[in-house]
Image (cartoon, rainbow, N blue to C red):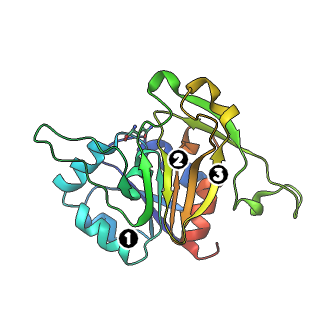
Amino acid sequence: MVKIGVLALQGDVREHLAALVHSGVEAATVRRPAELDAVDGLVIPGGESTTIDKLTRIFELADPLKERIAAGMPVYGSCAGMIMLANEIADPATDRQGNPQQTLGGLDITVRRNAFGRQRESFETDLAFRGLEFSAAVPGTEPEPVHAVFIRAPWVERLGEGVEVLAQVLPEEASHTGTLHGTARIVAVRSRHLLATSFHPEVTGERRIHELFIRIVRGEA
Ligand code: GLN
């Protein structure tokens, strides 16, 4: 059985563990390099990317994580996790010394933090999501849309080579945020072994994004 870790430094760790266990894999928290060595794939949860960044360095996980990502370990990043996987942040936060926040990188995208607005602009919508064909009730038909919850969510502003768009928010779906200016925004991407969503499937009982990730870990997708 594959074993999937959840980076457990900050954020909604428990919800991801539950989603993974429900989807039929062994799941474990990862706080130490030895725990990272023991997993076949990793979820980086939503939370606060500046805090996760600092803690990965304090816990001496940043370099081991970068090495595993470069070696092909599958990783799924949700919201702050998407930011941690991005090669570039359009608007990084800076600490008191003026040092910009860092990411682990690996996924050749540029993200913009809090792009849909602050907490008050958090919203939910249904999205068409590529790659979930396995979940269609009748093979060959469209799978059900994904109910997506966006909480101070980033969006993807630049796609590098080989990065595939899995889902976008259309302007009418987030019109209340006033931030889309008529442009569809990319909120889910995949590049080989790396998967990222701006939203939080782990809080709604949606299991198919975790199932897709498990397929990637198993080499089936
Ligand atoms: N805005 C947060 C950040 O920059 C992400 C929010 C979330 O994960 N729900 O890290």
| Residue at numbered disc 3 | 167
C-alpha separation, residue under disc 1 versus residue under disc 2: 23 Å
| Residue at numbered disc 1 | 69
Report if residue 198 is visible in the image.
Answer: yes
Determine whether label 1 and label 2 are within 8 Å by CB: no
| Residue at numbered disc 2 | 18
Residue at image position (23%, 49%) is 55
Q: Amino acid at mark 2?
A: Ala
Camera-side mark, 3 or 1: 3
Q: Tell me: residue 139, above or below residue 78.
A: below
Q: Crowding near pointer 3: few (<14 within 10 Å), some, many (20+)?
A: many
Camera-side mark, 2 or 3: 3
The mark that comes first in sequence, 3 or 1, is 1
C-alpha separation, residue under disc 3 versus residue under disc 1: 23 Å
Question: In the rendered image, which quarter contains the N terminus?
Answer: bottom right
Residue 125 lies in what quarter of the image? top right
Q: Crowding near pointer 1: few (<14 within 10 Å), some, many (20+)?
A: many
